[in-house]
Image: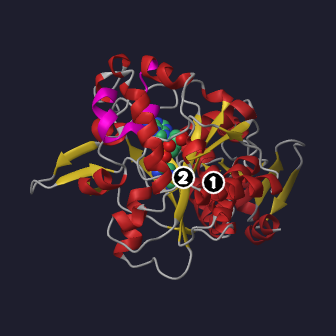
Amino acid sequence: MNEIQSLRGTADILPPQSALWNEVERKVAEHFERYGYELIRTPIIEQSELFLRSIGEDTDIVEKEMYTFSDRKGRSVTLRPEGTACVVRAAMQHELLGQKIRKFYYMGPMFRYERPQAGRQRQFNQLGVEMFGTYSPLADAETISMMVRLFEMLGLKGVSVNINTLGDKESLEKYRAVLRERARANFDKFCPDCQRRMEKNVLRLLDCKVPSCKEIFQNDLPAIKDCLTDEAKAHYETVLKQLDLMGIKYVETPQLVRGLDYYTHTIFEVTHNSLGSQDALGGGGRYNDLVESMGGAPTGAVGFAIGEERLMIALAAVRGEEEKAKAADVFLVSMDEEAIGENLVLSDALRTAGISVALLPEKASAKSQFRQANASGAPCVLIRGGDERGKGIWNLKMMESGEQKEFTKEEILSFFKE
Ligand code: HAM
């Protein structure tokens, strides 16, 4: 075994799975583009301040999970734990937000120092979207429906959508007061983190991962619905009504709060039963105050991110056996050493014409080459040796029928193009 191994909580994505990842990413990109989203790529490393101000200082992510260090000039930098803050930063920096609605999607690695387990890594990948420039509840419904349709498009059955609202600032203030009062009455039962967060950011008590803390509110959670302003209530009702009209099933989940501070109004999480305890496939919501709190103009925004590792686990569970890598279109067999060079020339022309070719670039017995051709899954082979050289042709053999036919180079090219 190598002395140097990958870091705990990171993973190599090896063939043939890597081909599946590519396929999923291509389909997801096409899906997002059908809804008018444009690709944005932001740096993996940002100023730490960005995440403190957006995700929130009292969250688990910021307090315990960030990869934060000083660069060589002593500036505090952080490997991004999520994408929303980065997209907001980029959109503001490049003045992409204004009159028009703007929609961005991103894919790539995020970093959180969590305890690794199945479906939970320290470096993981997200597929995410962010829409800016509208406060409309219909945009929330469109976003949620886009996520649900994405799973359907990938053939992933059995997802559930959990939905809740946090309301606007006023609703949330009222709710925080009710929650704080309830929490204070149980002060001693909470973990030290919750005791500390109770006064500063009481909402965080609802996503504490300590089981005994979870229990406290389990049967006796104050309802956010009772604290909503009329406007916030109307917003939420419109989202649900629109989802009903679109035939999107959901479960109203009053205990859902999400672990990031920037949310307002609609929040949602999608789960899949194949994922065990780490069952959140993705989550998101509206964050109307974030752009303004980062120094921009008031800008309505909504988005979500899907955990790509978890998506692949769920897909594998649904699809059953792991899929094979894509086979080459043709395998070139070289019967002597000269044929290797001739086959390389032919492969060059075939590949340029868009045909995928497999061949061995070194001397090997015919038997071994046919064995590899079989294993490659290529439907046919092209054989070149002394006889073929004499006639200026290749022998094309169909693997399944064993049928064989002579072809010149030009004939081969037009055969495969067809
Ligand atoms: P999040 O819920 O923190 O939201 O992460 C979204 C998804 O990323 C999770 O549902 C999960 O599938 C995946 N994920 C999170 N942590 C890990 C991990 N340690 N290992 C594997 N997968 C993980 C956000 O990040 C928000 N930025 C989503 C959003 C976008 N809200 C609005 N716009």
Above/below status of 400 relative to 190: below
Residue 392 appears at what percent x and percent y? 73, 65
Mark 2 to mark 1: distance in Å? Answer: 7 Å
Q: Residue at x 44, y 64 (%)?
A: 41
Q: Which residue has dot 1 on it?
A: 233
| Callouts 2 and 1 close, C-beta under 8 Å | yes
User: Of callouts 2 and 1, which one flags the residue occurring earlier in the amino acid sequence?
Assistant: 2
Q: Residue at x 34, y 28 (%)?
A: 194
**Could you say whether the residue bearing mark 1 is in a helix, strand or loop?**
helix
Above/below status of 80 relative to 342: above
**Could you say whether the residue bearing mark 2 is in a helix, strand or loop?**
loop
Q: Amino acid at mark 2?
A: Gly
Q: Amino acid at mark 1?
A: Lys
Instruction: Say which mark, if any, is on residue 167.
Output: 2
Q: Badge 1 local density, few (<14 within 10 Å), some, or many (20+)?
A: some
Q: Residue at x 48, y 62 (%)?
A: 288
Quadrant of the rendering where the N terminus is positioned: top left
State which quadrant residue 157 falls in: top right
Above/below status of 15 relative to 117: below
Residue 260 placement, left or right of 379: left
Q: Badge 2 local density, few (<14 within 10 Å), some, or many (20+)?
A: many
Residue farthest along the bottom direction in this orientation: 99
Residue 233 placement, left or right of 199: right
Residue 267 appears at what percent x and percent y? 57, 48
Residue 296 located within the stretch drawn in magenta: no
Ligand 1 within 8 Å, label 1 CB: no
Quadrant of the rendering where the C terminus is positioned: bottom right
Residue 320 appears at what percent x and percent y? 74, 30
Residue 120 placement, left or right of 369: left
Residue 344 appears at what percent x and percent y? 58, 59
Which contiguous range is marked in magenta? 194-211
